[in-house]
Image (cartoon, rainbow, N blue to C red):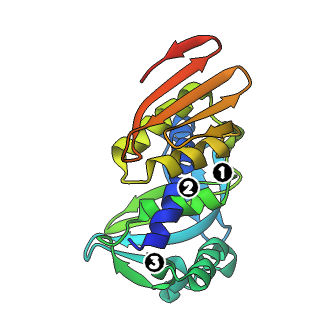
């Protein structure tokens, strides 16, 4: 992954990850289906949302193909707005993963690209729709408020701890970007940052290598130390 893409991922992964947890709670075990001509995705019999196509993963050669490059499928331009925006960002900022039509998943996978796209669009989350031979990645637009609203402080602590356990990111930048996206007010020092919102406070401490060493929460007057 290029340094420029890594930086974008670090900034957006916390907010995107929080939305994915919340969206999973909403979906439960519903099945999925898309109507390309209408530009909508349905989940079960009761949920329907507008969508934006991102791209596909192919199992055969373990590759990613951007939707804007999938000319054989004759996809509607209206469903390619977001991935074209990412392509434009890549051209302006020298991000090859956004401008290369197809590449190996060893470089970057669909989840990473979809989380960045989701981070650029606060009202969207994303979905990976598996099919025989691969998977389709797309943004779910106009997501429910329970998905896009700032998370509770307890969930914010969970997101911080899970993100650093799963992904290789700059801990300080990730924590700062995520907590700001959740409407916390930040007080930042070299070795810690304190985030406050209403009666809640979260203090994140960093070691000498800039990695999170401790997270303390004062939530409605009670304390916790993950």
Q: Is residue 100 above or below residue 60?
A: below
**How busy is the neighbourhood of tag 1: few (under 14 within 10 Å), some, or many (20 plus)?**
some
> Nearer the observer, disc 2 or disc 1?
2
Tell me the element at label 1: strand
Name the disc covering residue 35, or none.
Answer: none
Total marks in image: 3
Distance in Å between CA atoms under marks 2 and 3: 16 Å
Q: In which quadrant of the rendered view does residue 57 lie?
A: bottom left
Contact, mark 2 vs mark 3 (Cβ under 8 Å): no
Q: Residue at x 51, y 39 (%)?
A: 21
Contact, mark 1 vs mark 3 (Cβ under 8 Å): no
Tell me the element at label 2: helix
Name the disc covering residue 48, or none.
Answer: 1
* Residue 69 position in % (x across, y down): 50, 85
The residue labelled by disc 3 is 97
* Residue 23 position in % (x across, y down): 56, 42
For marks 1 and 3 on the same chain, the one whose residue lies earlier in the sequence: 1
The residue labelled by disc 2 is 12
Q: Is residue 222 above or below residue 138?
A: above
Distance in Å between CA atoms under marks 2 and 1: 25 Å
For marks 2 and 3 on the same chain, the one whose residue lies earlier in the sequence: 2
Most foreground residue, 179 or 40:
179
């Amino acid at each position: 992954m290029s340094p420029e893409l890594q930086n974008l991922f670090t900034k957006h992964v916390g907010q995107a990850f929080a939305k994915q947890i919340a969206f999973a709670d909403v979906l439960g075990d519903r099945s999925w289906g898309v109507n390309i001509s209408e530009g909508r995705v349905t989940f079960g019999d009761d949920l329907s949302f507008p969508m934006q196509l991102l791209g596909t993963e192919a199992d055969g050669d373990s590759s990613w193909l951007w939707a804007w490059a999938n000319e054989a499928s004759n996809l509607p331009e209206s469903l390619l707005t977001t991935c074209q925006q990412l392509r434009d960002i890549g051209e302006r900022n020298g991000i090859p993963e956004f401008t290369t039509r197809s590449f190996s998943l060893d470089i970057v996978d669909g989840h990473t690209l979809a989380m960045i796209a989701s981070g650029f669009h606060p009202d969207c989350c994303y979905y990976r729709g598996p099919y025989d031979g691969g998977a389709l990645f797309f943004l779910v637009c106009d997501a429910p408020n329970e998905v896009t609203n700032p998370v509770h402080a307890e969930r914010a602590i969970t997101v911080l701890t899970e993100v650093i356990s799963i992904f290789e990111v700059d801990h300080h930048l990730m924590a700062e970007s995520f907590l700001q996206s959740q409407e916390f007010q930040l007080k930042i020092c070299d070795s810690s940052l304190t985030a406050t919102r209403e009666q809640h406070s979260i203090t994140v401490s960093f070691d000498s290598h800039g990695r999170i060493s401790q997270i303390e929460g004062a939530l409605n007057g009670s304390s916790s130390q993950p």
